[in-house]
Structure formats: C-alpha cells, structure tokens
Image (tube, coloured by chain):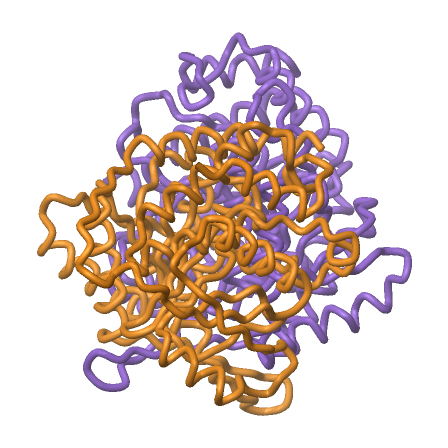
Chain colours: A purple, B orange
Amino acid sequence: MATQVLRRRLGQILSQANPKPNSKLSLAKAFSSATAPIRATLFPGDGIGPEIAESVKQVFKTAEVTIEWEEHYVGDQIDPRTQSFLTWESLESVRRNGVGLKGPMATPIGKGHRSLNLTLRKELNLYANVRPCYSLPGYKTRYDDVNLITIRENTEGEYSGLEHQVVRGVVESLKIITRQASLRVAEYAFHYAKTHGRQRVSAIHKANIMQKTDGLFLKCCREVSEKYPEITYEEVVIDNCCMMLVKNPALFDVLVMPNLYGDIISDLCAGLIGGLGLTPSCNIGEGGIALAEAVHGSAPDIAGKNVANPTALLLSAVTMLRHLNLHDKADRIQNAILSTIAEGKYRTADLGGSSTTTDFTKAICDHL
Amino acid sequence: MSTSRRSVPLLKTLIAQKSQTRAVTYMPRPGDGAPRPVTLIPGDGIGPLVTSAVEQVMEAMHAPVYFEKYDVHGDMKRVPLEVIDSIKKNKVCLKGGLRTPMGGLPTRHENVDIVVIRENTEGEYSGLEHEVVPGVVESLKVITKFCSERIAKYAFEYAYLNNRKKVTAVHKANIMKLADGLFLESCREVATKYPSIKYNEIIVDNCCMQLVSKPEQFDVMVTPNLYGNLVANTAAGIAGGTGVMPGGNVGAEHAVFEQGASAGNVGKEKIVDQKKANPVALLLSSAMMLRHLQFPSFADRLENAVKRVISEGKYRTKDLGGYSTTQEVVDAVITNLD
C-alpha cells in the first residue's frame, strides 16, 4: 500500500518535472530510430497484473526496445475529477505519451459507480477496440484456421451507462447510436484493413429488428466502404454471424460492430483460439492514442503465485509496438512468443503446462 | 466439409445423453386420444418443404393430430385475423419459417442438450426507437420485474419438471447495472424457491466463450431477449447448425413450434429449388409439440426415428455433410418408425 502511494507520488513528480511537447505520436515516430526513449504509460492493474507487467518489462529490456515506462496505479478513493478510482494524473500521462499498456483491472458488479474500463474509454475517447484473433500454432483448440480481427465501437451503443427506473419494477436502458461515432469506427476499420492487407470487412448488425439504430450504423459503414472500392464489404446479421463463427471461422476477415455485439463476438473469437489468456487487444483513440490492454480478468485467486500467463499482455504490447511503427522489434518479440508456445517445453498452467511466469518469460527472452 | 463432420459427432453424443435421461409414463384419461387440431403455417422459403415433411411423418405414424393449414408470408403487414383465431382456438401452432418474425406471443427456445430459455417480449427488441436529432438515434431496452419473474419461473419450472440439475442466468449486469440487475434479482428470488436446483450467473461474453470451448458445463440457461438470441444461435452452431435445432415458443395459453435458431435458411433460394432443406429441426420441433399436446409416446417414436436416421448417416442433407434431398430424409424417417 505504502509503496503504491510512493510510486504514484513519484510518477506525479516525474511527470511534472518533464513536461512533454503536445504533438505526441509524430514526434515519437520521428525519434523512434534515435536513441531518445519513447515514453509509455503502464498500468499494471490488480491481481496478477503486476507480475505480468514485470514480464513485459523484462522481455522489452532483453529485446532492447527503447521504451521508458511510466507506471500508474489505481487509487482506492474516488477522484472527483474523473468520478472513478483512476486519478486525473494517470489520464494526463496517457494523453501526453500517446501510448500505453494496461493490465487487468477489477470492476465490482452492480455497485453504481463508473467502471474503470469505461472511465478510461470515455475520458481518453478510445473509440475503437481492435482484437486480432489468430490460432496459435502449437496450441491446439477445436479451431485451427482462425485469422480474423474484430473491431468494436467502444464509446456508445448499449454501454452508454444511461439507465433509469421508470416506476418500481420497470427499468429502461438507452442504446445510443450516432453518425459521428459510427463513421469514425468504420473509417478506422477500413483504414486498418487497407494498411494490413486484409481483403474483406463485414459489418455485424441486427438492423432487421433495430431498424433505426443499427440501420444508422450500417448506413455509415456503407458510406465509408464506397471510399475503399478494393476492399469487399458485406453485412451479416448477428445471429448468422454467431453461427458461422462457431461452424467455420475462416469465413471472416475483419469484423466491425457496435458496442454490445462487439463485446460478445470478440470474446467468442477469443474462445475460439484458446481463451482470454492468449488474446491481445488495443484501444485506439482520437489523435492517434493507442492503449493496449490485456482483456482477461485480474484472477485474484492466483495473484502473487507466479503462475499467471503473461501471453495476452505480451501480445498486446506487440500491437502497441506495431502502432508505433516499430515493426521489426514487434515481429521479433511475437515470433519469440509463438515459438516458445509451439515448442511446448515451457507452458503456464492454463495452457496445460507447469512452468512459472518467470520461467516462461525467460524462455521467451532466450528465443529472442 | 470438415466443419460439418466435426459437429456431427458432438451432436451424436448430445442426443445419446438425452435419450438416456428420458423416462416416459403415461396414464391417459378417457378421450385423450381424440385427434387434436393444430394450426400449420408453412411460411416462406424452405418452410413449405419442411412442413410437408412433418405432415408426411405424422400421417405415417397415425398421430392423433390434424393440421389446419394457413398461408402466411413474411411480407404481409399483419398476421391475418383468421390465422390468429385459429391459433387461439387450437392453442398450438407449427410454423415453417417466415422471413421476418411474427410478433405478439411470449416465447422461449429449446436446444438439443442445452436448453436456452429466452425472454422474448421485451428487452432490446422492444422496437422503441427514435431519432433524437439528425445523426443521433436512441433505442430503448426495457426490462420489467413482471416479465423477468415470469421467465425465471418458467425456467425453473421447466428444470424441475424435466429433472434438470442447473439453471444459469446470462447477463451483463456489470455494465447494465439497473436493467440486467433487475433481471438477475428476479432470477435469484425464484431460485430460492427451488433449493434442489443449482443456480449460477454468468456474464454474456464469458458465456459465449465457454459455450465455444466447454459447452458441457451448461444445462438450462435463462436469458433476456438479445443475449438469448445470440446464445441460442451460438449453441445451434455448436450442436450442428440450424438444421437440427428444434424450438418451441410457449405462452400462457398458446404455443408455437418452429426451428430453434433463426439464422436465415429461410431465404436460401438454392436450397428451396433443389429441395435439399434439412427437415430435422422442424421434425424435432413437432416432437416437442406432441409432448406439449401430451402424446409422449408418439413424440418418442418420432424422435427415435430421427435419431436413428442421423446416427446411421446414410441420409443427410448438405448442412450435415451429406447429399440427400429433403424427401429422402423424410422417407428414411418413416421407414425407421417403430
């Protein structure tokens, strides 16, 4: 507890002492080949968070990635400026640095304050959640040919958090869809498809039932698709999509969806490749902010026991590197991770092995 | 076709498990065997094809039902009054498939070994949408204690009467605290009245992930509207596709039986032309209908015949990895009736 407070205070002092210029990413890219380190915010999170964050730092150090981490922790009191346990300083840090990595954070169910993840999304305007799902060679699941990306609108839709009780026993929850947000996420989806050489973008919806809301989302996707004629665009109803994903996931390439469907589908896809412990994820915000995160829970039951699987956080860190255009380093680290898992000698408990976190990390460092 | 072949063994084990747990006792009251009228709506697309399959098999079994057929199509603005009257009179209806869903009756769905009980009158599909200002649209998701309690009671009653061990409530109450929170509250209250049935809750995204990796942990699932739609279709995909999932929509006074998962095979013209639609789902739904009408022995005969045909593997339609036409499968089922 005391060390956390100390670290936070240290972070505050450091950030106050080193004001960064406000052009974030372009400056970072310009300097990435030089020796000036890129600053990135790190939220280790709760539970197993600190252990796996340690793992990431070690791998990056061995790979000689010039990133300087600014660590921030979640407080235990509500900061009135953010209405949640995240402090204003933490958010400012991410805004300044332009990139961040986040470990798992716990959200208590049904308590009434804003969830931490929602706070981050709203305050940093993280409008797209990108989750690449590909089958890991060497780790066998019932599905071997998964290679898709789910892009989920992350600010509105069903998760607006606008609920109220009409009369006793009747509750209403508002689902909001706006043209601006839908266009924004559609633009990102097609841009991503183009820059990563993907052939097809599928918009997932339920516009046959929710004609105005999902209808607006589809209209925006169609508009954007006309600007990218070389990419195939299709629309799939969500029930069909669920069924096809479960029967033949190779049919899909890039999926773009509103918030709720995106949540469910992206977790479904994670299930196809082996679970949340292996799935990377990255949140894109306005102005080129990227916050990579591990989407699994904080697993309090195994916290501190050195058995957690750091793969998800490592792969998320890799997507963060790609966002920074450090592709060669990203490829090196990714290959090291994949070959370690494929080899099978060092695997954590959730993958069926018995290695500790530190052994697994060391094996990856050896593979670099 | 490797994906279809992969799902069929799973289907076989699921079906095998189900037949082991079923026990039938039937003491008829005098007059119970009189033929019962059932409203039949063939519908669009593959609908007529699969409903005629059901008619043939019912005839071959000499089942005590007779059908009153009505023509309803998805593009009609409302269901014709005479059809509604017929359903109200007969209280039971068998539906082929309409291109857009028919509204107005409270509904639930059923699955092969997992039973998905889905609230179907409110929730996300209330249809209450409006444009606030140009470019901003709102849709209302309504959850009421009345409907949540009703569906929870049905779910536990179903589990109790069918000797099921566990009911799982599917929700997203960590984000939609009030709406899904109300749903969960109702489920918890009802759960206390059935202490012998295990109750647990699972968040919908975790649920889909578990369905895909470890479906055997689920027994009966109760969900609000939207999640129920997704979960049912995911479960259908795991169990072998829409072609084999039966479905029943049960209300306080009426029941409508149809294919369990809505993912649209209704619109596939190619399948209709070549007469290759899979009649298994509707046949299993009509078996559910027979149970609802309290003719369990006929239902058993029908289900056993269908299971035998599927496990034999000689007559299978395209979605299960075979090459047969609808008629061939129907003939096979009729020959397998005992």
Picture coordinates of residue A13 (x, y %)?
42, 50
In the depicted structure, whether residue B145 falls above or below residue A187: below
Task: Pick the quarter of the image with the C terminus of chain A.
Answer: top right
Q: Nearer the viewer, residue B143 or B310?
A: B310
Q: Nearer the viewer, residue B188 or B72?
A: B72
Q: Nearer the viewer, residue B98 or A193?
A: B98
Can residue A287 be seen from the camera position used here? Answer: no
Picture coordinates of residue A233 (x, y %)?
79, 60
Which residue occupies 39% across, 54% down? B288
Picture coordinates of residue A116 (x, y %)?
38, 57
Label count reads 0
In the depicted structure, whether residue A192 falls above or below residue A39: below
Position of B338 with respect to B24 (left or right) is: right
Position of B42 with respect to B272 (left or right) is: left
In the depicted structure, whether residue B184 falls above or below residue B318: below
Q: Quadrant of residue A171?
A: bottom left
Can residue A71 be seen from the camera position used here? Answer: yes
Picture coordinates of residue A234 (x, y %)?
76, 60
Which residue occupies 31% across, 65% down? B180
